[in-house]
Image (tube, rainbow, N blue to C red):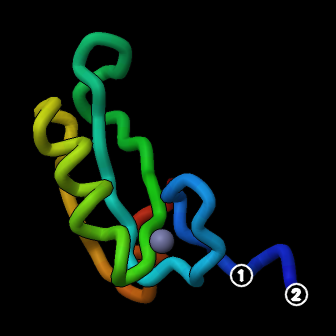
Amino acid sequence: MSDETPICSAKGCRADAVWVLAWNNPKIHTPERRKTWLACEEHREHLSQFLGIRGFLKDVVRFEDWEGSEES
Ligand SMILES: [Zn+2]
């Protein structure tokens, strides 16, 4: 019920996010910039593939490891 519960970024998915996908679009972002998507276990592969095909995907990290390691 809390707004702070991270939710999967996949369309229509309300599951808790377990993974953080860090990505960068070199056409619009500077190289060090990181955009993040959140993913549940089920959608991690789907979202990773979506970004990976475009060459945008930089990192996939467990949500609990992402927090504290780097700020958005
Ligand atoms: Zn999901």
Residue 46 location (% of width, % of height): 27, 59
Secondary element at tag 2? loop
> Which residue occupies 22% across, 66% down?
45
Viewer-side residue, 47 vs 71? 47
In the rendered image, the residue lying farthest to the front is 12
Displayed quadrant of residue 40: bottom left
Q: Which mark is residue 5?
A: 1
Residue 36 location (% of width, % of height): 44, 51
Total marks in image: 2
> Vertically, is 33 above or below 64?
above
Secondary element at tag 1? loop
Q: Please indicate whether residue 59 sits to the left or right of residue 17 in the image.
A: left
For the N terminus, the quadrant is bottom right
Q: Please indicate whether residue 33 sits to the left or right of residue 50 in the image.
A: right
> Which residue occupies 41% across, 65% down?
70
Residue at image mark 2: 1
Q: Which mark is residue 27?
A: none
Crowding near the residue tagged with mark 2, few <14, some 14–19, many ≥20 C-alpha atoms within 10 Å: few
- What amino acid is found at the position of numbered circle 2 in the picture? Met
Residue 44 location (% of width, % of height): 30, 69
